[in-house]
Image (cartoon, rainbow, N blue to C red):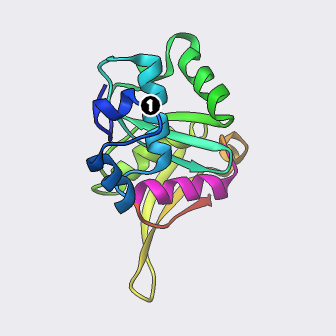
């Protein structure tokens, strides 16, 4: 299993090696990343998956994994996710993590995150003061299909992309 912390740290509880401790102090990884990486390692062992990072907002945790690793992470009949939900006491969503190069990548992330609601498109909105943010367009008829409150999803998308994100219903 590929994770943001080394294999030795995956296998131990409570302590991190100096390199991973430094990553934690510098904010490269979070406490949540460490906790979930260890839980996934206990569940999946040396399975050929990549855990990228985890993001939390409200009672929802989004786990980002490598390309094609979602089914293995979820497990047969969702058994791995059920165990993680029981352990963490929060709802969990597993999506494919990707590098954000443009609005197409944001749309793919939003599509995975907002499922079963469908995404109409993603725009970059330029603010008068020079800043910018992503505006995710969701069809009005899908408003009730969102897996979480719009504010929580905006928060998660902002954490993942590193840019402010807003949801607009059209």
Q: Is residue 9 above or below residue 167?
A: above
Q: Residue at x 38, y 54 (%)?
A: 24
Q: From this viewpoint, is residue 149 visible?
A: yes
**Front-most of residues 83 and 18:** 18
Residue 133, x across and y down, in percent: 45, 69
Above/below status of 116 relative to 169:
above
Q: Position of residue 79 (x, y in %)?
A: 57, 15
The quarter in which the N terminus is drawn is top left
| Residue on which the image places disc 1 | 38
Camera-side residue of 147 and 48: 48
The picture places residue 155, in percent across and down from the top left corner, at: 57, 58
Q: Residue furthest right?
A: 144
Residue 8 placement: quadrant = top left
Which residues lie in the magenta part?
Answer: 148-161
Q: Residue at x 38, y 17 (%)?
A: 45
The secondary structure type at the circle numbered 1 is helix
Is 152 part of what is drawn in magenta? yes
- Residue neighbourhood size for the residue with mark 1, other residues' Cα within 10 Å, grouped as few (<14), some (14–19), many (≥20): many
Q: Main secondary structure of the magenta part?
A: helix
Q: Give 27 or 158, whichever is nearer the viewer.
A: 27
Q: Quadrant of residue 82?
A: top right
Q: Is residue 71 visible?
A: no
């Amino acid at each position: 299993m590929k994770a943001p912390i080394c294999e030795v740290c995956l296998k131990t509880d409570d302590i991190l090696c100096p390199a991973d401790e430094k990553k934690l102090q510098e904010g490269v990884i979070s406490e949540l990343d460490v906790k979930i990486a260890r839980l996934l390692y206990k569940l999946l062992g040396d399975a050929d998956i990549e855990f990228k990072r985890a993001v939390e907002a409200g009672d929802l945790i989004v786990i980002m994994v490598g390309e094609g690793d979602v089914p293995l992470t979820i497990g047969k009949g969702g058994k791995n996710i059920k165990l993680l939900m029981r352990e963490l006491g929060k709802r969990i969503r597993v999506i494919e993590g990707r590098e954000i190069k443009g609005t197409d990548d944001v749309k793919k992330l939003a599509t995975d995150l907002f499922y079963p609601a469908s995404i109409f498109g993603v725009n970059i909105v330029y603010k008068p003061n020079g800043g910018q943010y992503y505006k995710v367009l969701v069809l009005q008829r899908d408003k009730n299909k969102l897996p979480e409150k719009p504010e929580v999803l905006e928060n998660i998308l902002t954490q993942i992309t590193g840019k402010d994100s807003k949801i607009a219903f059209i």
